[in-house]
Image: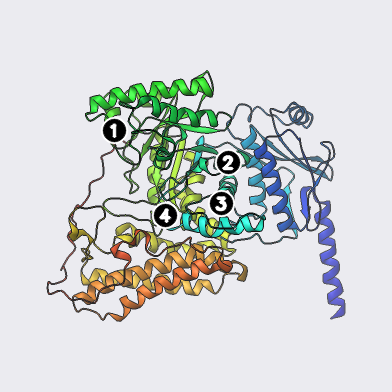
Amino acid sequence: MKQLFIFIYLLFLATAMQAKDAKAFLLTKNEAVTLYCHKNEALVVQTALNLFRQDYVKVLAASPRTESLKKARIVVGTIDNPEIAAWAAEQGICLDRLQGKHEGFLLKVLGVGNKYRLAVLGSDKRGTAYGLMTLVRMMGVSPWQWWADCEPTPREVFQLEVDFERLEVPSVAYRGIFINDEDWGLNPWSSNNYEPKMRQRNGEDSTPRNGEIGPYTHERIFELLLRLRANIFWPAMHECTVPFYLIKGNREVADKYGILISTSHCEPMMRNTNGEWRKAGLGDYNFVTNAKQVVHFWEERVKELSGSDCLYTLGMRGVHDSAMEGAKTIPEQVKVLTDVLKVQRDLLARHVNAQVDKVPQQFIPYKEVLDCYHSGLQVPDDVTLIWCDDNYGYIRHFPTEQERTRKGGHGMYYHASYWGRPHDYLWLATTPPELIHAEMQRAYRHGVDKVWVLNVGDIKPAEYLISLFVDMAWEGSRFGKDKLGAYMARWYEEQLGMEGKELLPLWKTYYDLSFKLRPEFLGGTRTEEKDPKYKLVSDVPMNEKEITERLSQCREMIDAMNRLEKRVPQTRLDAWFQLVKYPLSAMAAMNEKMLGAQLARHRLANWDKPLEAFNRIVTLTEKYNALKDGKWEGIMSWQPRNLPVFAPVKEEYVDAPLTARTNGKLVFQSDLCIGTEL
């Protein structure tokens, strides 16, 4: 036995020595790898380098050391730096493939004999940062490590083959998210939990500040975006939230992480009109009767942000999501908007760049503004046109051939979360990945490749859809439909440390059932209708057989989930709960609650299961908010907007029979797609 042990030990030692002599770029546990990065690299590169250092400690238990360009094993740099360009030429690296590219990067192993080095080169500052973030992800660090509590697993070794090379350039120029309808998640979590805790930790006043989504929260959001290789952010803008630029530190942390700030369709010139006009404006927000004050309101912010990276929204609507004041007819609105665009462009030329076509700008033809656009409104050619889906995942407009010739190009604003008619879906993220992929790929084929922004609600629980959306924007047409399954499997494997493909049947059930009827729609109610009858829970058009089959599918999904949970590594159980157990269990419980109650109302089932299902939803949500010693307290609500569908079921009976068959009824019609067809 002793001889066998010695043999195994010698074999291991020989293998280890062989690995050290192998022709590869090798990083081993406890090895303090040497780095070079020029001190004048942009702030976002320095930020990414600091994240790399932190991640390296977690993965390989050592702190990287700074070394000279000639001696460092990892060289990080942007190719417009003459020193880096000269070094690359000495190493025989052809930079033509990167030159002039937007946010591209190259990872390449270099060396002779047993001395191998790694080059991390970017075409610009964000490209270099994305190269570093791609490297740490290859080392096993998920972009969601903080937001989903999936800390990386320590490694003994990380290796890249001698011929390793990875060149990437994003397909969509600006990729990012919109925090929206934050009243029941991100806002209370940030203002009552995370911001006070972080201020206390840093010796500041820890008193909660109502409505504050501050720099500590935004630093976490922007770190996530940087790790996801996203670059644009529309801040939360509801009245309950203090406007982004009114909180000290928010602007600075965006600059630190290389994030361009932009705004939604009703927030022109970087102004959160809903939250700021009543504080900084004088008189009515009316360009027809109060143009001087309105222009002054815009100019103040443009002057303030002249040194920051922004994508300016042009145009004008009402104070919040409403039509502009002072112009009632479409021709009147066209005339006013024409004047507005001229004034706004003059402000940008005066305070940002005299060559105004060099300033990133967008115009969002949404609601009544779309009517103005179709009625002849002339938008400057260098301005990007941002199109929208119908709030339910179906895109309303694809650029025509003539529109595709625009210098400013086209963008897309897409919903994974929504507040409004005929009903919200703010609770669970249930838009099918197949639908997102089909619609966004169709948009990409029609020239929508300048801006992609996803309405993500509170970020959680839309983690997977956010990753999917941003990675599709990066890959463009290379992200084919055939990649969806493998992508999902890899994503869950990355977060959970288990075989991801075993989860695919569960998610198929989750998305298939939700596509037919989202959990928020199971009450048969509508929102924002004048008739009070739409606030009363009523039967959805499903017969007994359909309900029974649907509930059976839910139970099978949960049974399979419970079996798989036993295989989850102990260190990833919190991530499992957030990313898998809560959404699947909550969706199944809502079906059992509402459809079980529908059967019970018709005396086809007992009331015990729907009543228990309600309690289960509440308990699940309480557990979510208690995770990690209260880290997520306030982030998840089981009743956003307190809509009737979320309330406990009422034990009441109806005499009318349950529908014998499904009769589809159109209650809301999406706008038809305008422009070229498939």
Q: Earlier in the sequence, mark 3 or mark 4?
A: 4
Residue at image location 72% in from the left, 28% down from the top: 81
Q: Which residue is mark 2?
A: 254
State the CA–CA distance, disc 2 to disc 1: 33 Å
The residue mark sitting in front, 2 or 1, is 1
Residue at image location 39% in from the left, 54% down from the top: 432
Q: Amino acid at mark 4?
A: Asp
Q: Earlier in the sequence, mark 1 or mark 4?
A: 4
Q: Amino acid at mark 3?
A: Thr
Whether 664 is drawn above or below 170: the answer is below
Marks 1/4 in contact by CB < 8 Å: the verdict is no
Whether 77 is drawn above or below 146: the answer is above
The label number, if any, that marks residue 183 in the structure image: 4
The label number, if any, that marks residue 526 in the structure image: none
Q: Amino acid at mark 2?
A: Ala
The extreme left residue here reads 656
Residue 475 in view here: no
Residue 497 in view here: yes
Say what secondary structure mark 2 lies in.
Answer: helix
Q: Earlier in the sequence, mark 2 or mark 3?
A: 3
From the top left corner, tell me how far across and down residue 183 is, in percent.
Answer: 42, 54
Q: Is residue 599 left or right of residue 320?
A: left
Q: Which residue is mark 1?
A: 325
- Quadrant assignment, res 158: bottom right
- Quadrant assignment, res 527: bottom left
Q: Earlier in the sequence, mark 2 or mark 1?
A: 2
State the CA–CA distance, disc 3 to disc 4: 15 Å
